[in-house]
Image (tube, grey):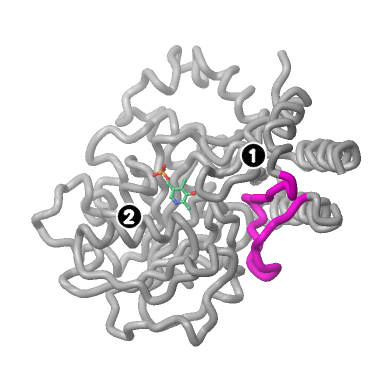
């Protein structure tokens, strides 16, 4: 067996330890005589799995008691609609657009109700954060939506740049949740599709302050209503049980890495060596994002000579470095270096890139 170094943007790499544990437990979970996929979501075995997953997540992120944790389906994209359906309550909401994902969130919310773009950096190619002067907030907005890590453009909003604006902050953290410490109390709601930093696709995590529940009109479907899902412990209907189980194993793995402080230190070093390789390549590689908002999870870069793109991709793949092709809207390359990509994998990429630049520069 040989495993690749996987730089996929999502579904993305999972910790090998987690996969091995899932393999070991596949046919007979803890003496249950069946797989987690085959057991009732209402039985005591699965109840213990979901309760442990929530407890471990609460511990990792220090989620205060006044917040609910929901394990939902439909991906972050469903949240783009579900958020205004639940939280607008006949009012308007503000969106700050810093890349493709927050733009999609805004466009989808516009289908549901009255929302406005409070700032956008699209004219700068989504390579920077908006300045304070550029952000035009409505003080009466039902909420302010931001995406703190733009997976496609590689723009991450540092925690210290997130100011309290007096309206509840709703944040898409799909591609960097659990990669570093965040103060959950700053947010009204945090959401994330699982397939970047949590587990398999099909699971969506929502962390929501209790006062944000119960605002939805009675006309929305009950599976879409956060309050109904919270009242039913995410089990109004059958939840994505296997995804929740794997997410729980990932949370336990994260605790063994020293929690968010431990993984933060590794992520900092991974990003440092990769950006250093790009910045010190004498222009052979280029990352266009401002230094104060470069993502530590998704690193897009171009080659000065785009004719070499195909050669770069073929040779890197042959070297076991996989899924480096950039998103079609940005071009070039993108290395997604989520929690589960170890420092050794990023070092292997940097070694390849240095060698490739030397041979082709
Ligand atoms: C991947 C991603 C999404 C979309 O997630 P789906 O689960 O495919 O709906 C939304 N926002 C961000 C920041 C993402 O990285």
Q: Position of residue 316 (x, y in %)?
A: 75, 30
Q: Earlier in the sequence, mark 2 or mark 1?
A: 2
Quadrant including the C terminus: top right
The one of 214 and 320 positioned closer to us in this rendering: 320
* Residue at 32% over, 24% down: 40
The one of 269 and 295 positioned closer to us in this rendering: 295
* Residue at 56% over, 41% down: 9
Residue 349 sits above or below residue 186 on the image? above
Residue 141 sits above or below residue 262 on the image? below
Beta carbon at label 2 within 8 Å of ligand 1: yes
Does residue 308 appear left or right of residue 60 in this picture? right
Q: Quadrant of residue 127?
A: bottom right
Q: Which residues are magenta?
A: 285-305
Residue 348 can be seen in this image = yes
Does residue 132 appear left or right of residue 227 in this picture? right
Does residue 41 appear left or right of residue 218 in this picture? right
Mark 1: give few (<14), some (14-19) or many (20+) Cα within 10 Å: some
Mark 2: give few (<14), some (14-19) or many (20+) Cα within 10 Å: many
Q: Quadrant of residue 128?
A: bottom right
Q: Position of residue 74 (x, y in %)?
A: 33, 41
Helix, strand or loop at disc 2?
A: helix
* Residue at 51% over, 80% down: 163
Quickly name the residue at label 1: 253
Quadrant including the N terminus: top right
The one of 320 and 212 positioned closer to us in this rendering: 320
Q: Between marks 2 and 1, how big is the CA–CA gap?
A: 29 Å
Helix, strand or loop at disc 1?
A: helix
* Residue at 47% over, 42% down: 194
Quickly name the residue at label 2: 80
């Amino acid at each position: 067996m040989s495993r690749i170094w996987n730089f996929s943007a999502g579904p993305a790499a999972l910790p090998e330890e987690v996969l091995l544990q899932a393999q070991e437990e596949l046919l007979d979970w803890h003496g249950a005589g069946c797989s987690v996929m085959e057991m009732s979501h209402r039985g005591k075995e699965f109840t213990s799995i979901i309760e442990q997953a929530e407890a471990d997540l609460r511990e990792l992120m220090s989620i205060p008691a006044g917040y609910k944790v929901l394990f939902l389906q439909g991906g972050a994209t469903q949240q783009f609609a579900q958020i205004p359906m639940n939280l607008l309550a006949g009012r308007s909401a503000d969106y700050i657009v810093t890349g493709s994902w927050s733009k999609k969130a805004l466009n989808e919310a516009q289908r549901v109700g009255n929302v406005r773009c409070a700032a956008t950096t699209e004219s700068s190619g989504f390579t920077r954060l908006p300045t304070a002067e550029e952000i035009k907030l409505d003080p009466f907005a039902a909420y302010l939506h931001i995406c703190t890590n733009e997976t496609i453009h590689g723009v991450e909003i540092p925690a210290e740049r997130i100011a309290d604006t007096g309206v509840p902050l709703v944040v898409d953290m799909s591609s960097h949740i659990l990669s570093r410490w965040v103060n959950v109390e700053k947010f009204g709601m945090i959401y994330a599709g699982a397939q970047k930093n949590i587990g398999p696709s099909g699971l969506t995590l929502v962390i929501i302050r209790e006062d944000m529940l119960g605002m939805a009109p009675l006309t929305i479907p009950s599976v879409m209503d956060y309050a109904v899902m919270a009242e039913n412990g995410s089990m109004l209907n059958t939840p994505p049980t296997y995804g929740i189980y794997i997410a729980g194993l990932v949370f336990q793995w994260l605790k063994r890495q020293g929690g968010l402080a431990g993984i933060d230190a590794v992520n900092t070093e991974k990003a440092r060596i990769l950006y250093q390789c790009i910045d010190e390549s004498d222009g052979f590689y280029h990352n266009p994002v401002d230094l104060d908002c470069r993502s530590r999870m998704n690193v897009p870069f171009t080659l000065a000579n785009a004719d070499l793109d195909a050669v770069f991709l073929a040779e890197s793949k042959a070297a076991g470095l996989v899924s480096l092709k950039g998103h079609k809207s940005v071009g070039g390359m993108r290395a997604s270096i989520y929690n589960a990509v170890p420092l050794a994998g990023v070092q292997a990429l940097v070694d390849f890139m240095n060698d490739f630049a030397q041979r082709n520069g």
